[in-house]
Image (spheres, helix red, strand yellow):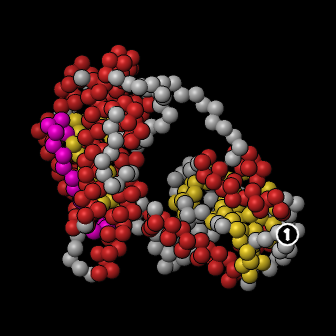
Amino acid sequence: MDLIIKQTAIFKKMTIDYIINKYSLNCVKLCSKTPLYPCNIYEYKNMYIVNNFVLNQQYKLDLDTAKYSILHVCYKNLSYRNNLNQNVINKCVIESDYKRFISKNINYITKKYTNYINKYIWIIGRKYKNEKTLELENNSFLLPVFLESVSYVRKCNRKKNTKTYINDNVVYDDNVVLHQYRRRFLYTLKDYLGDVDFSYINQILSNSVCLDIEYANDIYDDFSNFPISNNSSCLFMIGVFDYKNTYKNFIASQLDKRNEGIVLETYLDYVHEKISNNGKIIIFHWSNADKIVLEKTLLRHPELYQFYNRHIINNIVYIDLLKVVKSTVFLNSYSLKYVLEKLLNIKYDTQCKNGLDAMCSIIYNDIEIKNSKTHKKLIDFETTNDIIQYNKLDTIYLYDIIKKFVN
């Protein structure tokens, strides 16, 4: 998390400096005695008040210049609902928990300046992705995007979760799970298997692997060309576990395209060999992220992507075990950690507790390698070995979940 905090601070400073320098503004700490002037930008945490004149100039809008807008600088990649169009204001898509986070910051501002504030909260993020076309724009200042009205977001902070979950507080034992949920699990699994002959379920499982991918996404963007954010996403590890209780991992020496390609090539050779020996195989994973990351990364390596399409894709069946479990039991959360604790009474015994921990640790290690200009590899770091253990447990536990319902 320290890495994200540092990157957030860098992005926030560059964003505000950009606005201040471009429009000759002064940054003033927000306080109750401070009068509002068009030449100032008022700061409170990661919220800012700026005269609408600035937004009109930056985004070719027509906002009331007698009023001001709240700007929220957000170290996230924002989705927006409209096509890229200078004449269209784009509605921002942000998770509800983040809306509540924003609302905590704006309460102070809106209580003192309600009559002056525009009804929208304008968001500045690193990159913008069209929710429909998935096109990505990496210029932080190209699109005007907004969140719902201030009053609406403030209400979000007061709303209570009224959704009812079944069986969340039940202490599960083998008999309860097998009796109540086994059939539901198997029927759901059958739906995802498609044309695979389900009558030989144990044979199917004997020809399957559990997959977990560790990926350094763009939380460590390069801002040397600000406001353009250069993508530094990189796949650094693929772990697999099969029915023979065999775990394998393929890990990059450094975070770069060449080493990423080596990991992908080794993994594809592994899968292709299994297909050659056993025919079609099942690949279990937790959430759709692993499949998306794998195929998105392959696009950066045309020869490997061509091999994947020609020899692999038609001989594997991806099954998102998260979707199967969601359709089987009702829980308050479906994070793998929570599901394991609830259903299998298992807790992780690693320093690395989640994918974000793994990602930040690997990025730190890679920075050290590049700065020291040594011949060190990622595998040489103690934290990397802990991440390998974390990845191994992830793949083994996926198989344990399957066995819980099937055997």
Picture coordinates of residue 392, whole percent (x, y) = 25, 47
Q: Secondary structure at mark 1?
A: loop
The residue most toward the left is 277
Task: Report the residue at 68% width, 55% height from top.
Answer: 104
Determine if the magenta segment contains residue 15.
Answer: no
Instruction: Identify which residue, 161 or 266, lies in the foreground.
Output: 161
Q: Is residue 161 left or right of residue 308?
A: right
Q: What is the quadrant of residue 366 in the picture?
A: bottom left
User: Which stretch did the figure color magenta?
Assistant: 242-257
Instruction: Identify which residue, 338 or 10, lies in the foreground.
Output: 338
Picture coordinates of residue 142, whole percent (x, y) = 62, 68
Residue 220 in view: yes
Three-letter residue code for mark 1: Thr
Picture coordinates of residue 300, whole percent (x, y) = 34, 61
Residue 316 in view: no
Residue wearing tag 1: 65
Crowding around mark 1 (Cα neighbors within 10 Å: few <14, some 14 to 19, many 20+) is some
Task: Report the residue at 30% width, 48% height from top.
Answer: 349
Task: Report the residue at 58% width, 54% height from top.
Answer: 79
Q: Is residue 32 left or right of residue 304?
A: right
Quadrant of the snapshot with the C terminus: top left
Q: What is the quadrant of residue 244 in the picture?
A: top left
Q: What is the quadrant of residue 322 in the picture?
A: top left
Task: Report the residue at 30% width, 44% height from top.
Answer: 394
